[in-house]
Amino acid sequence: MDLSLYFVTGRELLPPGKEYLESLEEALQGGVTAVQIREKNSDTLEFLQIARQSKILCMKYNVPLIINDRIDIALAIQANGVHLGQTDMPVHVAKTLLPTGMVIGVSCNNMDHVRKAIEDGVDYIGIGAVWGTTTKELTNPIIGVRGVGSLLQALDGTFIKAVAIGGINSSTVLRTLHGSVSPSGHRLDGIAVVSQIAASATPRSAAQRLKDSFEAWVHGFDVQNQTVQVYDVETIKNGVVELLQVIRDKNPLIHQITNVVVTNQSANATLALGASPIMATASEEMHDLSRIPGALLINFGTITDKDSMILAGKYANEAQKPLVFDPVGVGATQFRKTTASELLNTWQASVIKGNPGEMAALANSKEVQAKGVDSVGSGFADPASFIRELAKKERCVAVMTGPTDWVSDGTTVVKLDNGRKILGDITGSGCLVGTCVATFCAGASLLATAPGTNPGTESEKLVRGNMLIGAIGGVLALTVAAECAAERSDVHGSGTFLPALIDELYKLKPETLLSRAKVHVL
Ligand SMILES: Nc1ncnc2c1ncn2[C@@H]1O[C@H](COP(=O)(O)OP(=O)(O)OP(=O)(O)O)[C@@H](O)[C@H]1O
Ligand SMILES: Cc1ncsc1CCO
């Protein structure tokens, strides 16, 4: 059974003037691959009639029909399956009533539900609610995009299919699919959609758009899984130098929502590298800024603009622009933890950068502690494995700073050994790394979208360009510049070091980067 575009009906959502059967037929023409009839407010006779009429249409388009909750209706019309909620008929009882071959699906919103569904031998599960929604799933807890992956991992080795449900529409679909992959690589088999189709005046095109997005994404996912990119030190260094040139030639806009402590030095570091900073925080301007080529940095050192952070990130994903997230001091307060979770469940970061204390807090690890914005202790026993797993789980590039910097895309791990201890003596050196990473990622994005590259071929992506090289470039630029600055005779302490660091970013030459960079591919 093809569950890729699983339409759950909602007659109460029909727009004025639209008949139910007309809407359903258009949805089927648009490419819906499975239909579930959900009638929460109808009596038995009405439900039966709707189910019967829907079945005729579904058969015409050779699409399976599933009945929500009501086993008697499913039996009466010989539906292809039933869908059971957690408070509906238990699966083992349903199995005794249903003929073999009739599909059983179950709603799940936590690991216990998934384990039970596996034990009961269901055919598919509907995981939700992924997003907030105006339809039935409102009563279910919102698990967020990042919650779906771990539930999918439990299905490894089974034949049980999975769809996600709850608030999936054309603007959330790619984020949902990209984020809903388990660390083992288990992806969704489909998306369940209610209002985007049911409430549409043009359900055919609504369905078509969703199906196109799903197919494009699956294709991109398969291609990515088949291509193992192997990096060597020379390729990385040359890639970084190429990005520095792109930044200086093209002067990308680096939109930064950052903390009040580092705003000025971050803007100066951006200019020194050859890019153009804008430190804009009003939600009204987030959309306009997202349309300009470059990158977005979200640093929540002082969280005063959460709504803008949410909006800006969504628009950056839509525009396929790099989004660098710096969860400053995320372990310090519950508010920061909750905010990080909310942000990461809303948009997809291209790069997450933090010190070991911040990265541990994001991963719910107790191995490294933090004090305010600082990391405490000597870090992880096995930083390479930690960062690879975090990158895999968050589905992005992860950068962990410290005396040694670690960068991973979930497959490759790169260890960077540049920098000077004095970086720890100025405030916001980690924030400066974030700014430099965003600037180099902007370079990578511009390189990937330069005239001559085909914009239509990567419509399934949330970001274009090589974010691993961008992240490495940002770290190397800052740490190599720091070495040059620390060696200057006019630097006498942290006060004179900061302006010297900006100078050295300004003067940074490709040959200095190439000769000083200490890059190790693990
Ligand atoms: N002992 C050290 N030797 C060399 N480089 C260092 C050392 N400590 C930090 N760095 C460099 O300083 C940069 C910032 O890393 P750090 O982990 O100190 O950030 P942070 O704790 O987030 O800083 P902040 O909170 O002040 O922004 C990194 O690029 C890292 O390589
Ligand atoms: C000191 C400080 N407090 C909030 S953000 C920040 C900058 C370094 O992370």
Image (spheres, grey):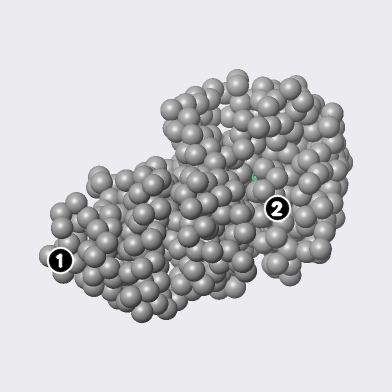
Does residue 44 appear to the left or right of 199 in the view shown?
left
Label 1: how many Cα within 10 Å (few below 14, some 14–19, many 20+): few
Label 2: how many Cα within 10 Å (few below 14, some 14–19, many 20+): many
Residue lying farthest left? 96
Q: Residue 492: x percent and y percent?
A: 82, 47
Residue 102 occupies quadrant: bottom left
What residue is at 15 percent from the left and 54 percent from the top? 100
Secondary structure, mark 2, is helix
Does residue 127 appear to the left or right of 487 in the view shown?
left
Secondary structure, mark 1, is helix
**Are the residues flagged by discs 2 and 1 in contact, CB closer than 8 Å?**
no
Q: CA distance from mark 2 to mark 1?
A: 49 Å
Q: Residue 44: x percent and y percent?
A: 32, 76
Residue 269 occupies quadrant: top right
Q: Earlier in the sequence, mark 2 or mark 1?
A: 1
Per the image, the residue denoted by label 1 is 97
Q: Nearer the viewer, residue 446 or 496?
A: 446
Disc 2 marks a residue whose amino acid type is Tyr
Q: Residue 340: x percent and y percent?
A: 58, 63
Inspect this view and state whether residue 287 appears. Answer: yes
Q: In the picture shown, does residue 61 fall above or below 357?
A: above
What residue is at 84 percent from the left and 48 percent from the top? 277
Q: How many marks?
A: 2
Q: Residue 384: x percent and y percent?
A: 46, 41
Q: Nearer the viewer, residue 27 or 214?
A: 27
Disc 1 marks a residue whose amino acid type is Leu
Q: Nearer the viewer, mark 2 or mark 1?
A: 1
What residue is at 65 percent from the left and 32 percent from the top? 456
Q: Which mark is residue 315?
A: 2
